[in-house]
Image (spheres, rainbow, N blue to C red):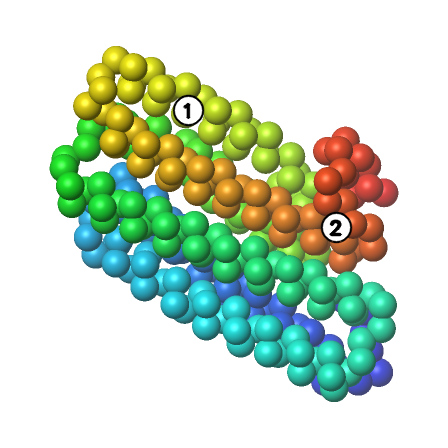
Amino acid sequence: MTEHISKQFDQDLEAIRSRILQMGGLVEAQTRLAVGSYLDGDTARIEQAIAGDTKVNDLEIAIDDELRQVIVRRQPAASDLRLIMAVSKTVTDLERIGDEANKVARMAREIHAQSRPKVARLQVINHLSDISIGMLRKALDAFARLDAAAAAHAIAEDAAIDAEFQSILRQLITFMMEDPRAISTSISVIWAAKAFERIGDHAKNIAEQVIYVVKGRDVRHTPLAEVQREAMR
């Protein structure tokens, strides 16, 4: 970030960035708890993941308030305003990732309470969740360093998530055709897979905001090859 005449302004911006990374860490931990509890039905981890949503929501409100105060007190110039806008959008994406993790944890509670599901059917989301959480971690790292090239690498992983989601759909359709008794569990797995696909979308949004801050260009809805060229310039 550029250095300002007002040292307090720099401190305000750095404090907000630190809060974003704190929120990102909470969301990542919540997501890991959610997928772990979905796979093994651990009641304590399910409740931890659900409870984590309140902390994420509280941080969203706190960061939004800090952003409003900075805008009122400092009247930021263009480059700083880009950062503030990007932070605001990133906060929203992180909160929505927390919502998806909460959804997965609640499905875990429901599916394990109803019956003992076949582990193989639940395990199909294992790889997808790994890719999604890894993409979130890379997007947050890019945000921490304001690294446009790293952000572009994170964005590129969205295609792998989409491909994995389609593969899971095909597997589960086969399960349901072979055994109609598997329909209920398979539908729950599809919803969990969709949640991780959405987490990937939100991680992509965060990475796109990094490029916006660093390069000054909005790369949403832009072909990947063009995003990569912009990030490397």
In the foreground, 98 or 29:
98
When asked about the image quadrant of residue 29, the answer is: bottom left
Mark in the foreground, 1 or 2: 1
Does residue 5 appear anywhere in the picture?
A: yes
Residue 15 at least partly seen: no
Q: Is residue 16 left or right of residue 224?
A: left
Picture residue at 48% right of the left edge, 24% below the top: 166
Q: Give the SS element for disc 1.
A: helix
| Residue 88 position within the rendered picture, expressed as x and y whole percent measured from the top left | 64, 65
In this rendering, the answer to whether 232 lies above or below 47 is above
Residue at numbered disc 2: 211
Quadrant (top left, top right, bottom left, bottom right) of the C terminus: top right
Which label was assigned to residue 169?
Answer: 1
Q: Residues within 10 Å of mark 1 (few under 14, many from 20)?
A: some
- The residue lying toward the viewer, choosing from 118 and 113, is 113
Kindly indicate whether the residue at mark 2 contacts the one at mark 1 (C-beta within 8 angstroms): no
The residue under label 1 is which amino acid type?
Leu
Residue 26 sits in quarter: bottom left
Q: Position of residue 10 (x, y in %)?
A: 73, 77
Above or below, 184 relative to 218:
above
Residue 95, x across and y down, in percent:
50, 60
Indicate the amino acid at tag 2: Ile
Give the SS element for disc 2.
helix
| Classed neighbour count for the residue bearing mark 2: other residues with Cα under 10 Å, few (<14), some (14–19), many (≥20) | many
Residue at point 39%, 67% (across, down): 54
Dot label at residue 4 = none
Residue 40, above or below 212: above
